[in-house]
Image (cartoon, rainbow, N blue to C red):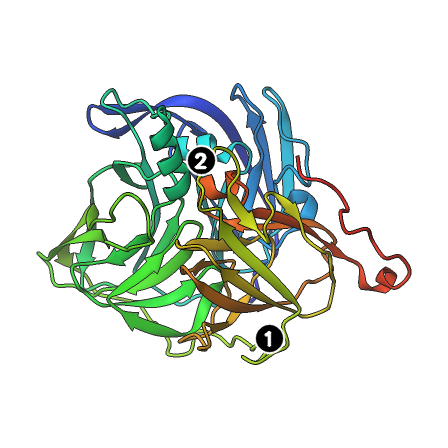
Amino acid sequence: MKQENKMVEYNLTASEFNWEIRPGKTINAWGFNKQLPGPVLRANVGDMLIVRVTNNLEEATTIHWHGIRLPASMDGTDSVQKPIEPGEVFEYRFIVPDAGSFWYHAHTNETIQMERGMYGALIVDDETDPVFDGERIFMIDDMKLDKYNHFTRPSWFLPILIERHDGRQGNTLLLNGKENSVINMNGGQTERWRFINSSSARYFLLHLNGKTFKIIGTDGGLLEHPVTLDEVLITPGERVDIAIGPFADGEIFAIESLAYNRTTFLKAKRETFATVRVGESKPSKAHLPERLRMIDPLAKQDAVISRKIKLSVDPRLRDGKDFRIDGHTHTNDQPVIAGELQVWEVSNSSLMDHPFHLHGFFFQVIDENGKAPAFRAWKDTYNLKLKSKIKIAWMPDNRIGTWMYHCHIIEHHAAGMMATFDVIDGSTALVEKPPTHAHHHH
């Protein structure tokens, strides 16, 4: 019997608080309900989520619901809402239409607010989900702290440039707000692990001492078939769900990130985030089918391109805005008409990788540098390797309003690699041609 769609209500209070990363190491965090990450919000497909946000910080904030196909007015950017001022309450209300691993995070002054802990997981369940013996959510983050465990502010000219170029990579590695944690699981069991990369800039190349695992989902939920791998790249903003196990009791292995070269000043290195200890074996009820769902292709690989978007970095490393979209910073892009298939070519002319994030809609990558991807997936964030080009297809539905796309390295977004565009109603589009610059981003 199908479950009834219901209202699911949460209260989130944003504030400053002390948070213990490991025994004896405490930071002054900003976050939700005095915990880091914020509370896990959970609902079933089709439920109405009502989240009342009280802002007890000393500055304004907004919350973006990353990956949720909600109305534009609820997207949580300052293009669509007045930021929530200190002492104010704002109520977000939206239906969650898709199952999967999503997340919420501040979308105002992000380089400070997200770095300090303003994020949490949002999980949407469906009765058709595969059955596992257990489930874990792992929010990947890092913080850049000085020897007193204070957040660093880039001071001298060069560190500012490096940090803006690379994005802020921290020296304190966190999984679910904790350093060097130990994860206990039972032998003989298969679990679903949901990874969410909530860091400012860290590329996380997941590796589990060479053990294989099955990817079962990405940003927009389940894949068509499980894909067996022993490593997978998870860039800022991306989610990857894996099926892992069964293991023999007594096994110990690390959750680590291998070095991934995204062309930064700071050299990438292999780093350990947590340790998994396998305890006594228990019987398993897990069942992972070979077909998880159907994903209908939106377009063929050679589909006609409707829009070209170019990400670039001004090599002169001047002060100010040097991360660009189509040669501009914080730009307004042309509107799209609801119901008209979009085939966008997104190219990266720069010498570094950028995770491209589209708000409010899922896309399919149909071509990357001339090749079709290995498997079909719904994505909202995709890594654009240096000097590369992807072709994505997506269908704007009737959620009229202002949306944005940007690089999800938070410092690159802040330095200009962001654009807004409107989805407009097709039936009226013929009557009135909207001006190109419908509004300006402040």
Q: Position of residue 163 (x, y in %)?
A: 37, 36
Residues under labels 2 and 1: Cα distance?
Answer: 34 Å
Indicate left or right for 437 with 99 as reference: right
Q: Nearer the viewer, residue 107 or 437?
A: 437
In which quadrant will I find the N terminus? bottom right
Q: Which residue, as the protein is rendered here, is positioned at the far left?
A: 250
Badge number at residue 298: 1
Helix, strand or loop status at disc 2: helix
Q: Amino acid at mark 1?
A: Leu
Q: Taking the image as drawn, is residue 238 in sight?
A: yes
Q: Amino acid at mark 2?
A: Met
Number of marks present in the image shown: 2
Q: Which residue, as the protein is rendered here, is positioned at the far front?
A: 316
Q: Toward which corner of the image does residue 85 lie, by quadrant?
A: top right
Indicate left or right for 198 with 49 as reference: left
Q: Nearer the viewer, residue 199 or 55?
A: 199
Q: Position of residue 387 (x, y in %)?
A: 43, 62
Residue in the image at 72% along x and 69% along y: 340
Helix, strand or loop status at disc 1: loop
Q: Toward which corner of the image does residue 302 lie, by quadrant?
A: bottom right
In which quadrant will I find the C terminus? top right
Q: Position of residue 49 (x, y in %)?
A: 59, 46
Do tag 2 and tag 1 residues touch (Cβ < 8 Å)? no
Q: Taking the image as drawn, is residue 44 in sight?
A: no
Q: Earlier in the sequence, mark 2 or mark 1?
A: 2
Residue in the image at 20% along x and 27% along y: 23
Which residue lies under the disc numbered 2?
A: 114
Residue in the image at 28% along x and 55% along y: 260
Q: Nearer the viewer, residue 138 or 390?
A: 390
Badge 1 crowding class, 10 Å Cα cut-off, few under 14, some 14 to 19, many 20 or more, is: some
Q: Position of residue 124 (x, y in %)?
A: 50, 54
